[in-house]
Image (tube, rainbow, N blue to C red):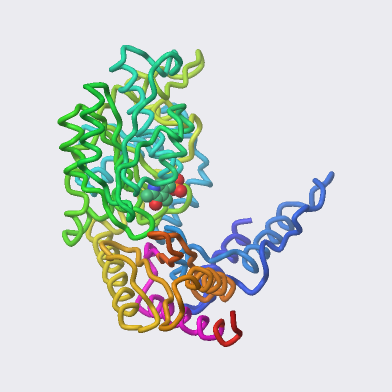
Amino acid sequence: MLELVAACQRELLSAPADEPVRPGAAESGLPPIGPPLPENGVGAAKAVTELSDRVLRTAIRSAGPRFFHFVIGGVTPAALAADMITTTADQNVGTWTSSPIGSRTEDIALRWLRELFGLPGEWSGVLTSGATMANFVGLASARRWWGLRHGADVDRDGLAGLPGVPVLASGYLHSSAVKSLGMLGIGRSSVRFHCDDTGRVDLAGMRAELAGLDGAPAIISASAGEVNTGAFDPISELADLAEEFGAWLHVDGAFGLFAGVSERTRHLVAGVGRADSVGSDGHKWLNVPYDCGFAFVRHPELLGPIFANAAAYLPGVDSEQPNYGNLGPESSRRARSFAVWASLAAYGRAGYRRMIEGHLDLAQRLAERVRAEPDLELLADVPLNIVCFRYHPNGVPEAELDALNTALAEAVLADGRVYFGTTRYRGVVAFRPAIVNWRTGPADIDLIVEVVLELAQRLRQVGP
Ligand SMILES: *Cc1c(COP(=O)(O)O)cnc(C)c1O
């Protein structure tokens, strides 16, 4: 089995630099309704060979250097190797007794992450499956705090009978924070947005709303790095507001928290150490494999009552050793810390700084290329690693641009040499390639412009 896996890995990892992101073979290689469950198995060798063949033929190369869709990181060599050990040792880091090494490594990994981002050492933390669950942990802590302010233990008794929870945010708020509010019973519609048409926070509006609450507790959910342009909420100003009105400040820094690793961008996250909770992602800019995120909470006493998994055969919340199943949403959990630890140990702070600064340079390079092309329009500043632009040739009326850019994005995905989709920014359809893969270099960036212009020309020759 190990030989089969190694062969598959060798093929995936030794692909030439210009390997298309989207392989020639269509879709999954599987019919929508697959064959029925076999009564008798074909054996491990045959099953694994079939899977490996299918992956090699059809899998989108999302871990490669030319994948710019969403915000999807690659995997460093150290993280890849560590993750294989994780799977092979198959630790359950829900309890200390089932995995002392997993629990202790998670301790260290979380401490290193706090140091990497300059967060206070006393904060509590937990690895999660991603930033969605990291937001969930932060907002669950906020919900518990909010309930206690109302004299209620919402984790024991629920939210019934209590007033609505006011959640204040700019237009940068990520969909996963809204999803988390839904999962927490606070409600997706609880968010009160204060922003202009780019999403930028309206501080005066937010202040007025907080003042109108007459001392009732509220949650401010801030974004360090929003997904269309990489823009940041002014964390310090929001921390000032939170302090003045006694609100909880949660910061979603899924990828933007990494701005703190470079002096060039550290100002963007200034004040994040004044937050009450912070969530971020490992599988994006840290370049560890799926799935991995992490949450930090200033008030360690909150997590136990929220996430305790209490049963006679399980350890208690306040046992001496960490039982991470009592500190986050998952009870049984894989040793995600192995890949985090190995990658941080392998490359250190300097290695990550080099990678991130390389990506900052690449984002500016792409912005320059876009500015230099008369048929391309840069739609926003580029503070970090996302470049928001569209195709906008002379003479094409505004009313036709959305359809043109949508068709162009479909052509880019079908072409597969580079890979990214569209968003809507200030009401218009736009591209927003995000640079987070450690292997991405200048040639990969230049190809974005080349492919867009080439496909656009082809599209316009064919006609509308
Ligand atoms: C990706 C992202 C999330 C969600 O993270 P998952 O890892 O997909 O759970 C949350 N917030 C922001 C800003 C993101 O970019």
Quarter of the image for residue 228 reads bottom left
- Left/right placement of residue 238 relative to residue 407 reads left
Residue nearest the observer in this picture, 188 or 62: 188
Task: Give me the residue at 27% from left, 66% from top.
Answer: 360
Task: Give me the residue at 47% from left, 51% from top.
Answer: 83
Quadrant location of the C terminus? bottom right
Magenta span of residues: 434-458
Residue 49, percent across and down? Answer: 69, 61
The reply to whether residue 427 is visible in this rendering is yes
Residue nearest the observer in this picture, 373 or 357: 373
The reply to whether residue 282 is visible in this rendering is no
Q: Determine the residue located farthest toward the bottom in the rendered image.
A: 461
Residue 247, percent across and down? Answer: 24, 29
Residue nearest the observer in this picture, 185 or 397: 397
Q: Height in image: 367 above or below 216?
A: below
Q: Name the main secondary structure of what is drawn in magenta.
A: helix
Residue 158, percent across and down? Answer: 45, 17
Task: Give me the residue at 64% from left, 74% from top.
Answer: 24
- Left/right placement of residue 299 relative to residue 402 reads left
